[in-house]
Image: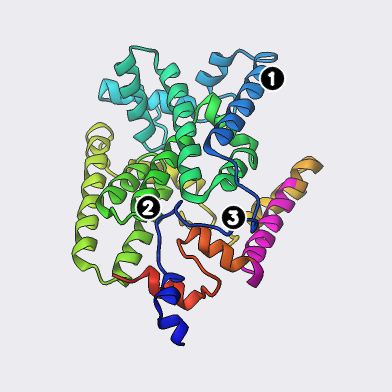
Amino acid sequence: MQFLLSPTGKARFEAMPAGEVPVAAGSAPSEPSLWEVLLMFAAAAVLHLLAFYRVRSFWDVVASGAGAGVDNDAYLQLATIIHNGHSMGEHVPPHFWGFSYAIIGVAKLFSIPEVMALVLISILSSLAVCILVHRLYGGWVAAAFIFINYEWIQLSIEGGAEPLFLCILCAGFLAARSSRWNLATFLVSMSTTVRPVGVFALLAFAAVLGLRKSWRQLTITTLIALAIGALYVLPVWIILGNPFANLIGYRGAWVRQGWPIAYPFGTLVPSYLRAYYGGTRWYRLVFLTVWPIVSLVGIRAMWLPRNRRRYLSIHCGFRGKAVTIPKLIRSSFRN
């Protein structure tokens, strides 16, 4: 107890900014540097392009949504609708408009076709995600992020809303880590205009500020989020005549319960059963079976006593050998 109250003992539980936590020499192999991670991404992208050009016409596939970016044609159609200010009586895709706004802005800024702007945004956003993930979680996580799902490389090169969404979301997480809550809320609110799932990050921010009893900051961030939401639905209301047109359009993709959110594994298990009895190829079934198991095993291994302390010291900003969950919680919600 005397040791814990001493300056040396207190230093062991001192919260530190991410990326500045010293790790004992020899305790773990050195992580890939940022340049190494970017080189990995460049190599994967070049290999994908070389394979792609051997069998397809790149720009035709991007514009039609025949590749990984299956929604590209929908986002380009939305960009045309936004640019014209009306839907011309045609079917309006239910996708959120944030990515289409970005396409219009980049196309105007660089005087390039919108399909080229779509690809440029995706590539630059994916590069930014590599940098942000490396900054947030380290080199190994950033490297795994690139290679763990080949579809990420496809979306990064062929175009898709996911790279832009993750870029803005990770930037918001980085701002939140340094307690710049106004900026973090603004960025995450902007990410919800690209992919609505970003709203869960806003709820997490609100929960943290509420547990910290930072009521003034919680009020400010709530107003920021509401303002972004109002500015988003206003043009949707003007052009389509319904401020909730996006949500209504997505109803066909909701789960059988009739809600956009399901209980745990409420979508995964039925999807797997449909794939199993629907004649899906065996390697696809193996993939659908293995990745949830590997994820659960990895989470379990991460919280084993021999790994927990190192994980908390690196990713939660603590150093020392005696970090416990109660100490982590108390320090996380300390004003």
Q: Could you say where residue 1 lies in the image, as x and y percent from the top left?
A: 46, 87
Circle 2 SS class: helix
**Label 1 to label 2: alpha-carbon separation:** 37 Å
Please identify the dominant SS of the magenta region: helix
Q: Viewer-nearest of labels 3 and 2?
A: 2
Q: Could you say where residue 228 lies in the image, as x and y percent from the top left?
A: 24, 45
- Where, by quadrant of the figure, is residue 213 drawn? bottom left
Q: Nearer the viewer, residue 34 or 283?
A: 34
Apparent side of residue 124 relative to residue 268 in the rendered image (left or right): left
Residue 169 badge: none
Q: Say what amino acid the circle numbered 3 marks.
A: Thr
Q: Nearer the viewer, residue 88 or 61?
A: 61
Which of pointers 3 and 1 lies earlier in the amino acid sequence?
A: 1
Q: What stretch is highlighted in magenta?
A: 287-306
Apparent side of residue 294 relative to residue 214 in the rendered image (left or right): right
Kindly identify which residue carries mark 3. Answer: 267
Residue 199 badge: 2
Picture residue at 64% right of the left edge, 42% below the top? 148
Apparent side of residue 320 relative to residue 295 in the rendered image (left or right): left
Across the whole image, how many numbered discs are drawn on residues?
3
Apparent side of residue 89 relative to residue 227 in the rendered image (left or right): right
Any magenta on residue 4? Answer: no
**Label 3 to label 1: alpha-carbon separation:** 33 Å
Which of pointers 3 and 2 lies earlier in the amino acid sequence?
A: 2
Circle 3 SS class: loop
Kindly identify which residue carries mark 1. Answer: 51
- Residues at badges 1 and 2 in contact (C-beta under 8 Å)? no
Which of pointers 1 and 2 lies earlier in the amino acid sequence?
A: 1
